[in-house]
Image (cartoon, helix red, strand yellow):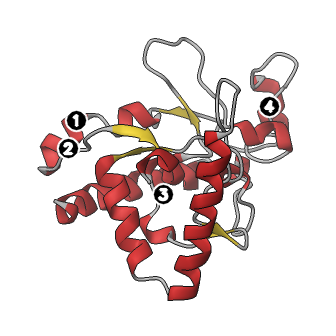
Amino acid sequence: MLNNYKLYLDFLNGKLQKFFEAQSPYIACKRGCAKCCQNGEYPFSQVEFEYIMKGFSILPAEKRQVILNRIAETKLAKKNFTGEKFLYECPFLVNNECAVYDHRGIICRSFGLIYTVEGEDKPKVPFCVYQGLNYSNVFDPETGMIPTEKYKSLNIPQEPLAYNVGYEFLTNEDFGKLYKFRFGEKKPLIDWF
């Protein structure tokens, strides 16, 4: 099943690479940024979890131990959490880099683009826009929109676009059927441990 999931990831990575390249004038993502890994829920399907654990299993023992310690700390923090939405730093983030980058989840691969959500009229911008990163060179935080005149003033030929790369769409079981695997149950990454 993981081999078929990997085929889907190869397809998805090819699409995402084209989207990121087309939007490169608006993308500030670079190695070591990691804002998207420092405060989230990180939805993971069962097959994604199995795949990330495959990547974890080939790490050096000392790095695995660092991650296991971070998992234990995060689980304890969640147990003691009394708010509505528990957000945490991804336990696989080590020294501001993903320790299992090649095995990361779908949400990790697609984050950073403007995306659409089925049933919602307005596209979603990545939260890092408010931190001066992706799309911040054209985004107007007061209106929550990207004014046409703002991106045109930068003389960038490619306009900022929204893509259908929301997590629910990318983990739709139709993709699993096409590639002959099942995503399975979905829940926050920390809940898989």
Asked if the residue under mark 2 is in contact with the one under mark 1, i.e. CB atoms within 8 Å, the reply is yes
Foreground residue among 2 and 157: 2
**Residue identifier under label 1:** 173
Asked if the residue under mark 1 is in contact with the one under mark 4, i.e. CB atoms within 8 Å, the reply is no
Quadrant of res 114: top right
| Residue 106: image location, x then y, percent | 43, 50
SS for tag 4?
loop
| Residue 34: image location, x then y, percent | 71, 59
Classed neighbour count for the residue bearing mark 2: other residues with Cα under 10 Å, few (<14), some (14–19), many (≥20): some
Mark-to-mark CA distance, 3 and 4: 22 Å
**Residue identifier under label 4:** 139
Which label's residue is closer to the chain start, 2 or 3? 3
| Residue 192: image location, x then y, percent | 41, 49
**Residue identifier under label 3:** 17
**Quadrant location of the N terminus in the rendered image:** bottom left
SS for tag 3?
helix
Mark-to-mark CA distance, 2 and 3: 21 Å
Residue drawn at the location 80% of the way across and 31% of the way down: 139
Does 9 sit above or below residue 145? below
Q: Mark 3 or mark 1: which is in front? A: 1
Q: Mark 2 or mark 3: which is in front? A: 2
Which label's residue is closer to the chain start, 3 or 4? 3
SS for tag 2?
helix
Q: Amino acid at mark 3?
A: Gln
Mark-to-mark CA distance, 4 and 1: 33 Å
Which label's residue is closer to the chain start, 2 or 4? 4
Foreground residue among 6 and 142: 6
Does 193 sit above or below residue 54? above
